[in-house]
Image: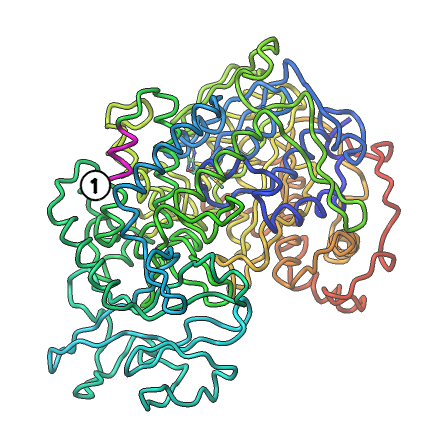
């Protein structure tokens, strides 16, 4: 009994789609710390149960499980999704990642904590911060006159210097501060006096009270801006070689006395606000920081963008209030005696950083901060947002706004509670039901159930290209490898790591390495001169080592997608070099179509789940020889995905096709594969074989001829008999 038999595309796709809408509500554990490209936990749970629970996944998913003695490895563990799912159902786990930050995060996720002690320490930290710097986050409400309203977000615009007349000017790409989704009107900034104006129609906003005609369009267009003083057309960078400077132009604030007022509260900064900022800057100048890193930002595919904007050191990415708040927080954390609690707060501190920097952007629709990692890069824009460092609580003690200590502490508390009280979310029609998973838990030991057996958790910071595991020791490998060059993990996490290392000390276990970057990271990276061949060779080494450690017939399962078919050559080569056959390629939605990091990129949100074994069986109906055969399989799967609530795009269908074509190419090449030939030759063989089976274009045409456009494929039209049985299976 196995994945090939028990997995159900429709059932799992529905779970994954829901989870990816708000992943924290389904897998609160991910809030321990940001990691990139986390796949849905429900997908890995479904895979594990399909393989080990011995029945159809629909029948086992909502039951509690305990699989003593089963060993699962993940050689690319990242934030730990597959590992935590396996650990939660009682498996022993082995995880490795080359990035010390990933290892830190997974250890923090796994390690038990006394939540009462944590809450006490976190509240203590908040009280101290409030006493020391709380006054820097206050503002006067211009409506009621209340002097100590909480500033929720400070909005800053970059300032340009005219190369000709040397005068300065604001770099607004647009003057819309808020749209009318969460606020009753649009809010526009006056280009002349900076006053904030409500308007129903941003195309015809009328006049500001100062007599200036309002406009939604700002002066910065395509990295060019005419100087408003002399008319000279300046090009970016507008601030020479220095880090950009900013001017505070608006504040969103919170006044509980106005809770019945519709929408949000905005103001133009008044003299008190400006004075408060001057006071902050002078406080910061007088401080002798111990915890602000001095590290330079290295060159990189993502990080070089920061150099182009004039940022040289990580500390340049923060304003004076953020540096003051972070240094004050770090000093308080460094004084916490209990090492477990200190580590937890340091992890929170590191996660907080992504909201407490001057790369955060304000979402004018949702009216919230988009953290630095909301796309998988370092996006620099001309308008930045600074969140209240402490965070705000409303009358019911619930967090208001995002990006402050209160938000992080609240999320972390929920995450750690989930370790001892995990749950699944089921739906009865549209009604959501939380199903407690009594008997399951995350960790090495369960502080709530000291009698429960200890689980083996082996976490390593190393390149999996060199990992050594005993032969025939693993029951499965479940992983989510880098998708060639999609995310630069090392470059991005360096941003948090330099602070965490400074706070905890370079001799702190797990923080000995200087950087999160590594030459052996398996990501395509132009700056580091790592291309597709390098990626394929690395992946092949890892899978070969994993294959040797797997028990006979045990699966290596991994997710993958890429918009370029060539990126699948690496996958095909790695599986074949490892001596495995691909017995299934299953589609599963793993991103949210609206995700900011893929918005507008036409990227697919569908992963192919590749199931590979040395020996096993695959249903005969999954084997195809041409585009026509593949179209029948795709039509069936598309129907399942639509029934699960997904609307597959052309990009999704191409990725599904790439996955299946790769599987069949492996199937054909396995008997004749020679792992000793050079990589370019292997690529050529794979490419030829793939193209001789089918091309994505031919399959798409075939689907169209069948009258099946992606968005209108219905559940009944092409659905074949869905009863999966390995009675009609092909053994390998
Ligand atoms: C897609 S992420 C994994 C995401 C993860 N499944 C999660 O849920 O967060 C891929 C991971 O592979 C790691 N990685 C890249 N090259 C590696 C190597 N040579 N050895 C071990 N890990 C590596 C990256 O650091 C990254 O964390």
Crowd rating for badge 1 (residues with CA inside 10 Å; few <14, some 14–19, many 20+): some
Task: Examine the rendered structure and indicate whether residue 268 appears above or below residue 652.
Answer: below
Q: Is residue 416 above or below residue 695?
A: above
Residue 218 location (% of width, % of height): 35, 80
**Residue 586 showing in the rendered view:** yes
Position of 708 compared to 236: left or right? Answer: right
Magenta span of residues: 328-334
Question: Does the magenta run of residues contain 333?
Answer: yes
Seen from the viewer's position, the closer of residues 718 and 534 is 718
- Residue at which label 1 appears: 292
Residue 238 pos. (x, y %): 21, 71
Count of numbered circles in the view: 1
Look at the numbered disc 1 and give the secondary structure of its residue: loop
The quadrant of the picture occupied by the C terminus is top right
Please tell me which residue is depicted at 49% across the width and 59% down the height of the picture: 596
Quadrant of ligand 1 in image: top left
Indicate the quadrant where residue 327 lies: top left
Q: Which picture quadrant has residue 369?
A: bottom left
Q: Please, what is the dominant secondary structure of the magenta stretch? A: helix
The image position of residue 207, as x and y in percent, is 39, 89
323 is within the stretch colored magenta: no
Quarter holding the N terminus is top right
């Amino acid at each position: 009994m196995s994945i090939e038999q028990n997995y159900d595309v429709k059932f799992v796709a529905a779970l994954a789609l829901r989870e990816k809408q708000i992943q924290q509500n389904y897998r609160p554990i991910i809030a321990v710390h940001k990691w990139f490209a986390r796949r849905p936990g429900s997908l890995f749970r479904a895979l594990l149960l399909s393989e080990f629970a011995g029945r159809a996944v629909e029948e086992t998913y909502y039951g509690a499980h305990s699989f003593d003695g089963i060993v699962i490895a993940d050689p690319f563990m990242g934030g730990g999704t597959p590992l935590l799912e396996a650990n939660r159902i009682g498996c022993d786990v082995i995880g490795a990642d080359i990035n010390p930050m990933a290892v830190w995060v997974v250890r923090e996720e796994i390690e038990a904590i006394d939540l009462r002690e944590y809450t006490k320490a976190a509240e203590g930290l908040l009280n101290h911060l409030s006493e020391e710097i709380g006054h820097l986050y206050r503002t006067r409400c211009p409506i009621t006159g209340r002097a100590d309203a909480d500033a929720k977000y400070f909005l800053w615009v970059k300032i340009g210097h005219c190369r000709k007349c040397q005068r300065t000017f604001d770099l607004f790409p647009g003057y819309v501060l808020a749209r009318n989704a969460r606020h009753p009107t649009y809010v526009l900034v006056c280009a002349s006096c900076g006053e904030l104006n409500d308007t129903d129609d941003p195309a015809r906003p009328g006049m500001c009270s100062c007599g200036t005609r309002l406009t939604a369009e700002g002066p910065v267009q395509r990295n060019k801006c005419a100087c408003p003083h002399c008319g000279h057309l300046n090009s970016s960078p507008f601030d020479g070689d220095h880090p950009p400077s900013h001017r505070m132009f608006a504040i969103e604030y919170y006044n509980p006395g106005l809770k019945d007022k519709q929408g949000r509260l905005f103001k133009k900064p008044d003299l008190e606000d400006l004075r408060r900022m001057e006071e902050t800057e002078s406080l910061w100048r007088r401080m002798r920081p111990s915890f602000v890193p001095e590290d330079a930002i290295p060159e990189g595919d993502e990080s070089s963008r920061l150099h182009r904007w004039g940022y040289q050191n990580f500390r340049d990415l923060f304003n004076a209030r953020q540096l003051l708040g972070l240094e004050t927080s770090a000093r308080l954390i460094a004084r916490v005696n209990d090492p477990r609690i200190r580590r937890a707060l340091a992890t929170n501190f590191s996660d907080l950083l992504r909201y407490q920097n001057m790369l955060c952007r304000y979402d004018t629709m949702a009216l919230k901060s988009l953290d630095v990692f909301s796309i998988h890069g370092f996006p620099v824009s001309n308008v930045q947002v600074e969140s209240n460092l402490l965070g705000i609580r409303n009358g019911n003690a619930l967090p208001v706004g995002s990006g402050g200590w209160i938000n992080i502490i609240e999320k972390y508390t929920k995450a750690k509670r989930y370790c001892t009280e995990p749950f699944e979310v089921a739906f009865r029609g549209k009604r959501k039901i939380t199903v407690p998973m009594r008997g399951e838990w995350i960790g090495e030991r369960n502080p709530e159930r000291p009698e429960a057996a200890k689980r083996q958790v082996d976490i390593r910071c190393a390149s999996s290209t060199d990992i050594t595991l005993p032969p025939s020791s693993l029951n499965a490998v479940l992983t989510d490898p880098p998708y060639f060059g999609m995310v630069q993990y090392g470059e991005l996490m360096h941003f948090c790591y330099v602070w965490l290392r400074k706070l905890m000390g370079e001799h702190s276990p797990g923080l000995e390495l200087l950087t999160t970057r590594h030459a052996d990271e398996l990501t395509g990276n132009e700056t580091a001169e790592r291309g597709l061949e390098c990626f394929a060779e690395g992946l092949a080494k890892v899978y070969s080592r994993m294959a040797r450690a797997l028990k006979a017939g045990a699966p290596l399962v991994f997710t993958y997608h890429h918009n370029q078919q060539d990126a699948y050559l690496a996958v095909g080569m790695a599986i074949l070099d490892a001596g495995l056959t691909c017995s299934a390629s299953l589609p599963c939605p793993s991103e949210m179509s609206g995700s900011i990091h893929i918005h507008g990129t036409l990227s697919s949100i569908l992963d192919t789940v590749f199931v590979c074994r040395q020996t096993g069986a695959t249903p005969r109906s999954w084997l195809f020889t041409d585009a026509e055969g593949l179209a029948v399989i795709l039509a069936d799967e598309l129907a399942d995905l639509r029934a699960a609530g997904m609307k597959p795009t052309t990009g999704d269908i191409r990725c599904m096709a790439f996955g299946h074509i790769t599987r069949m190419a492996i199937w054909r090449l396995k008997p004749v594969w020679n792992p000793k030939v050079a990589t370019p030759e292997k690529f050529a063989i794979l490419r030829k074989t793939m193209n001789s089976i089918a091309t994505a274009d031919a399959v798409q045409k075939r689907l169209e001829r069948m009258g099946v456009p992606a968005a209108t494929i219905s559940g009944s039209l092409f659905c074949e008999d869905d009863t999966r049985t390995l009675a009609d299976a092909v053994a390998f």
